Image (cartoon, coloured by chain):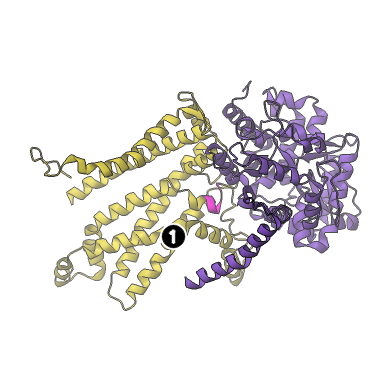
Chain colours: A yellow, B purple
Amino acid sequence: MAKKKGIKSPYSNSLLVPSATLYMILFFVPTILSLFFSLTRWTLQSWQFIGIDNFKLYFSEENLRIGFRNTIIYAVVTSGLKVIIALYLANFLSTKLRATGFMRSVMFFPTLVSTIGVGITFSILLDPYEGVVNHGIKIVAALVGKTTDGPGWLVDPNLLPILSVAFVDVWKGVGIATLIYIAGIAAIPRDYYEASSIDGASARQQFYKVTVPLVRPAMFSVIILSFVGGLRSFDLIWAMTGGGPGFISDVVASINYKQYTSGYYGLSTAGNVILFVFVTVLVFPLSRFLNKKEVVI
Amino acid sequence: MKIVRNSRFAKVLMLGLPAVLASAMLAPSAHAVTELTFQTWNSQDSRDKWDALTAAYMKANPDVHITVNYVPGGVEGDALVKSELASGTMTDVFAYNVGALMQAIDPVKNLVNLKNEPWMSTVNSGFIPSATGADGGIYAAPFGTAMGGGILYNKRIYAKLGLQVPLTWKAFMANNAIIKKAGIVPVISSWKDSWTAQLFVLGDHFNVAAAMPGFESKFTANKIVLTANPATMAGFAHLEEVRKAGYYNKDVASTTFAKALEKLALGQGAHYPMLSAGIDTIVANFPTKASDIGFFAQPGTNAKSNGATVWMPSGVYIAKTTKVLDAAKAFVAWTVSKDSFVVQNKVVPPSGPYFIKGAPVSGNLTAVFTDLYNYMQGKNTSYPALEFLTPVKGPNLSQICVEIGSGQKNAVQGAQAYQKDLQKQSQQLGLAGW
């Protein structure tokens, strides 16, 4: 990407027109439009310019604090767990076992399933009284001589619903992260492993001293991708809890969606502009920080 | 692929050819078939009714073909209808709520005024205000029956425990205590479908209106503070009171609308704050239990002023963007004709009175129908729900009610949150005084 001054491209700039047109229509124009409409009271048919009233109103939203808190919790939990779990999974699936190919496919399978389908399935499995999970807990509890109803995974009026959804998100999304790690591990030259084993390193030492440091570029990709994904996550949460019970598992994206369904188009657009800024403010420094580390290595 | 094509071809031959031949023979002038599109909710009872109605209409009018588009209800459906209208892609005719939700789709701009249609004189005058736009035009034909918002109750449990239908909230809570002692859930609620949580608040409007005459105009003009009046607080307080007494079913947070009706029908619970139309689902799923279920108005503080809050039926609208206005008008006129009611009665016996004068009522009428009918016939024993008298309705009420019912908020905090919700919506609608 580095610009080389003085050397002119041998191709005419007119070759850029098709892609530049697509970029303008699909990205640039909508971004400008959404910035504009976030400053209006908008009914899709007509609009009225109201300055920053939408932003004021948005920040006075009572449940916004819950929304931002949940968004950050969700992003940190899903991203953190994916980064760690996927690393071990990838290491395991990079070893030459007989069924590695098969196991890789199985691990990747949840990623291919529809998110809404996964959400509905898990909300049935996690039903506090009729779900399989709590039935299992009851049986285990009975074996050790205790009685319990099990937790109200998705209906508890505390932090549990958003965490339950986050765990399902990890199950569903860990496949992509693992895939990135597997590619990263495959790119590590074999020489390091050979050299370290000649020096008498154990498998564990090889993992921590060779694999982990050298897989860092992949790890940074996983961190950024899953963190951004977590920050703007919506579909799984909506399918499993609808932001409820009450507003306890609302995230910023679901608050925006509810405003949209209420017909508050301008307000909802302002919310999305805020979400965009919020994601940028969190991810840009993170990305800069990680890139710097990469250079040091 | 080949098989599919063949079978489709065969179908066209089998269905299409005779139809073409028949229409050619019947109508020598052979005018073309008018294509009409229609949109409604995809719930089971809506599907059953509209499938039967459109089939009957097409049979009677072979020169019209109706394509029905089923869309989800709830907030998803609201968003869809609004965007379809805004983008000019709405079907020619569609069914949607009247009242505040109709005001939110801007009838004057988007819908065809039906005020001068010949059938308008047959519409029950009680329906008119909730279908009237800001310009005085009337935009909807009524579809379906009135609904009562109150308490569905299991009459078998009432008989067994020797209970009387309560005329005051105090008497209601006393009944609940006895029911709980008998080991039965006193109040079923179903927060998994959060819209069902609103009934204690919305179904209390008869009592609010009785205590505060002229409430609606003050409410619309933002002159009411919910927390300042015992009457406007009662609904929110009920949610909290029932929770504190431990009268809800213990799986209330994960119970759905359908599951709650099952509990009521099977006698696992005694009361379900709900719209009377809930009986339709019981008739469909537990036909033998339907006669066990009755309906009573949500009781207030005064036994002498006891009556039901009544929901209007939904409306049938014509979008301004239609290119077949005459065909659309003819279809709407037919939906309020005798023929249409005969078909509707056959699909499911009405759970409340229709809003067309002289509409025939037949079929196996339920006790819920009779209970609601008596409220609506009586003097000062019924009153429309608030959303049919004002455009002001906050979209977050259902979640707020769940918060109060589950103890995340107390009644006062809930009412305050709802007041803010109202303010936000009214500002968006550009109403004066907010």
Q: In this view of the protein, which residue sits in the foreground, B301 or A233?
A: A233
Residue B273 is situated, as x and y percent measured from the top left of the image, at 76, 47
Q: Which residue lies under the disc numbered 1?
A: A172
Q: Please give left or right for residue A111 compared with residue A124 in the image.
A: left
The amino acid type of the residue labelled 1 equals Lys
Considering every residue shown, the one lying at the far left of the view is A6
- Residue in the image at 78% along x and 48% along y: B276
B137 with respect to B350 (left or right): left
The chain carrying label 1 is: A
Look at the image and tell me whether residue A169 can be seen. yes
Q: Residue furthest top?
A: B433
Q: Nearer the viewer, residue B277 or A16?
A: A16
The stretch in magenta equals: A238-243
Whether residue B152 appears in magenta in the rendering, the answer is: no
Q: Where's residue B60, x and y in %?
A: 74, 54
Name the residue nearer the viewer: B125 or B429.
B125
Residue B258 lies, with reference to residue B233, above or below; the image says below
- Depicted B59 relative to depicted B5: above or below: above
A51 horizontally vs B120: left or right = left
B76 up-or-down from B213: above or below? below
Dot 1: few (<14), some (14–19), or many (≥20) neighbours within 10 Å? many
> Would you place residue B218 above or below residue A183 in this image?
above
Which quadrant of the view contains residue A175? Answer: bottom left
| Residue B392: percent from left, percent from top | 66, 31
